[in-house]
Image: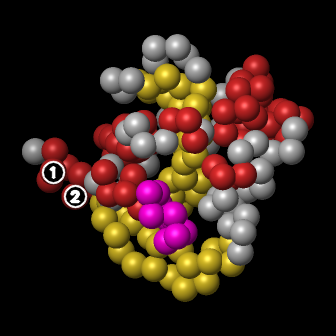
């Protein structure tokens, strides 16, 4: 693995960049304070902007590490932050990362998360040199599984009662893509 940290990335419609402390109000307003958005996530809904400020303080400090990967998803047309995506676990022994993402409800169903996830898949295989990228979702959140499929991840199975979301202990469905799959599809 060749760690690069959270590099600036672009897609056709998105900018993937490091979070800044000044993003707190938008993070809070656009997604972190919405219980419908955080319903299937493992972190709690933000009660006020100070929760968002604390999270951003922790993230911005972590950017000094070359193995910290967490991006703000911003619209290219307006620079407005609409979500986050990152590697929440990097396993050096397995040359693998687990990806998680979140986007504001206003932007659901517009293809932004698959677009961002495809760019992370490219970045992690082509630049970092990972062998495996995986993601998991609560099977009740069917749309998250669809996002993963659109980005090329393949469903591998469901572990019963293996995760806790903001609601309950729940099943965890896993999807993944290997470097060999990615490069074979690319050629």
Quarter of the image with the C terminus in it: top left
Residue named by callout 2: 181
Q: Is residue 184 shown in magenta?
A: no
Chosen colour scheme: secondary structure
Q: Is residue 134 shown in magenta?
A: yes
- The quarter holding residue 11 reads top left
Whole-number angstrom distance, CA of label 2 to CA of label 1: 6 Å
Residue drawn at (72%, 37%) of the image: 59
Query: Viewed as shown, does residue 46 lie left or right of 120?
Result: right
Residue drawn at (60%, 53%) of the image: 88
Q: Which stretch did the figure color magenta?
A: 133-144
- Residue 152 place in picture, x, y as percent: 28, 54
Seen in the picture, residue 163 relative to 134 is either above or below; the reply is below
Is residue 96 shown to the viewer in this render?
no
For the residue pair 2 and 168, the one nearer the viewer reads as 168
Label 2: state its secondary structure. helix
Is residue 50 shown to the viewer in this render?
yes
Residue drawn at (77%, 50%) of the image: 45
Counting other residues with Cα less than 10 Å from the Cα at mark 2, is it few (<14), some (14-19), or many (20 or more)?
some
Residue drawn at (49%, 42%) of the image: 108
State the count of labels. 2
For the residue pair 2 and 70, the one nearer the viewer reads as 70
- Residue 161 place in picture, x, y as percent: 61, 83
Seen in the picture, residue 113 relative to 139 is either above or below; the reply is above
- Residue 157 place in picture, x, y as percent: 40, 78
Whether pointer 2 and pointer 1 mark residues with C-beta atoms closer than 8 Å, the reply is yes
> In the drawing, what numbered circle is on residue 116?
none
Residue named by callout 1: 185
Counting other residues with Cα less than 10 Å from the Cα at mark 1, is it few (<14), some (14-19), or many (20 or more)?
few
């Amino acid at each position: 693995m060749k760690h690069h940290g959270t590099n600036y990335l672009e897609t056709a419609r998105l900018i993937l960049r490091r979070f800044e402390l000044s993003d707190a109000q938008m993070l809070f307003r656009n997604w972190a304070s919405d219980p419908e958005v955080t319903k299937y996530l493992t972190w709690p809904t933000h009660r006020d902007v100070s929760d968002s400020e604390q999270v951003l303080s922790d993230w911005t400090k972590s950017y000094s590490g070359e193995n910290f990967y967490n991006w703000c998803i911003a619209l290219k047309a307006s620079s407005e932050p609409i979500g986050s995506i990152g590697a929440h676990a990097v396993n050096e022994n397995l040359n693998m990362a687990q990806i998680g993402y979140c986007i504001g409800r206003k932007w659901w169903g517009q293809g932004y998360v698959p677009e961002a996830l495809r760019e992370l898949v490219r970045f992690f295989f082509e630049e970092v040199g990972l062998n495996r990228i995986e993601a998991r979702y609560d099977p009740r959140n069917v749309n998250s599984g669809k996002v993963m499929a659109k980005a090329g991840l393949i469903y591998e199975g469901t572990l019963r009662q293996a995760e806790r979301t903001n609601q309950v202990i729940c099943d965890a469905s896993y999807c993944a893509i290997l470097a060999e799959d990615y490069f074979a599809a690319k050629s």
